[in-house]
C-alpha cells in the first residue's frame, strides 16, 4: 500500500493543471463541471480527499 502524498511540488501543480486543461478541452467539459474535475484530479494524484482550496482554484483559473 502506498503512502498518501502530503505535499504537492510546483512540478506536480503544473502537471495537474496541464492534465486539467487537456481534459477540459478534449472532453468538452462545461465550466460548471470544472471544479469537480479538478478536485478529482487532485484527489486521485494525492490519494487524499482533503483538497487544498488554493490549489483547486489555481488549477481552474482561466
Image: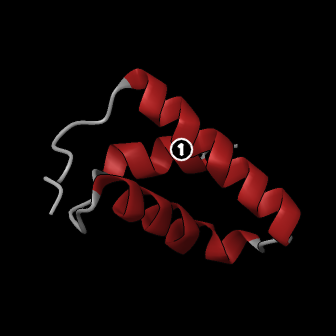
Image position, residue 38 (x, y; %): 52, 61
Image position, residue 44 (x, y; %): 39, 63
**Neighbours of disc 1 within 10 Å: few (<14), some (14-19), many (20+):** many
Q: Is residue 56 left or right of residue 5?
A: right
- Residue at image location 85% in from the left, 58% down from the top: 25
Q: Can you name the residue that lies furthest to the front here? A: 1
Q: Is residue 22 left or right of residue 18?
A: right
Q: Quadrant of the C terminus?
A: top right
Q: Is residue 27 left or right of residue 31?
A: right
Image position, residue 35 (x, y; %): 53, 67
Image position, residue 18 (x, y; %): 66, 40
Report the colour scheme. Answer: secondary structure
Res 51 quadrant in image: bottom left
| Label 1 element class | helix
Looking at the picture, does residue 48 appear above or below residue 30? above
- Residue at image location 46% in from the left, 24% down from the top: 11
Looking at the picture, does residue 8 appear above or below residue 45? above
Residue nearer the viewer, 53 or 23: 23
The residue tagged 1 is: 16
- Residue at image location 82% in from the left, 70% down from the top: 27
Q: Quadrant of the N terminus?
A: bottom left
- Residue at image location 49% in from the left, 60% down from the top: 41
Query: In the rendered picture of this protein, how many numbered marks are placed on residues?
Result: 1
Amino acid at each position: 500500500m502506498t503512502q498518501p502524498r502530503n505535499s504537492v511540488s510546483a512540478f506536480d501543480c503544473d502537471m495537474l493543471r496541464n492534465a486539467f486543461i487537456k481534459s477540459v478541452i478534449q472532453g468538452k467539459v462545461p465550466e460548471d463541471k470544472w471544479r469537480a474535475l479538478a478536485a478529482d484530479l487532485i484527489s486521485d494524484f494525492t490519494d487524499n480527499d482533503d483538497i487544498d482550496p488554493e490549489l483547486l482554484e489555481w488549477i481552474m483559473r482561466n
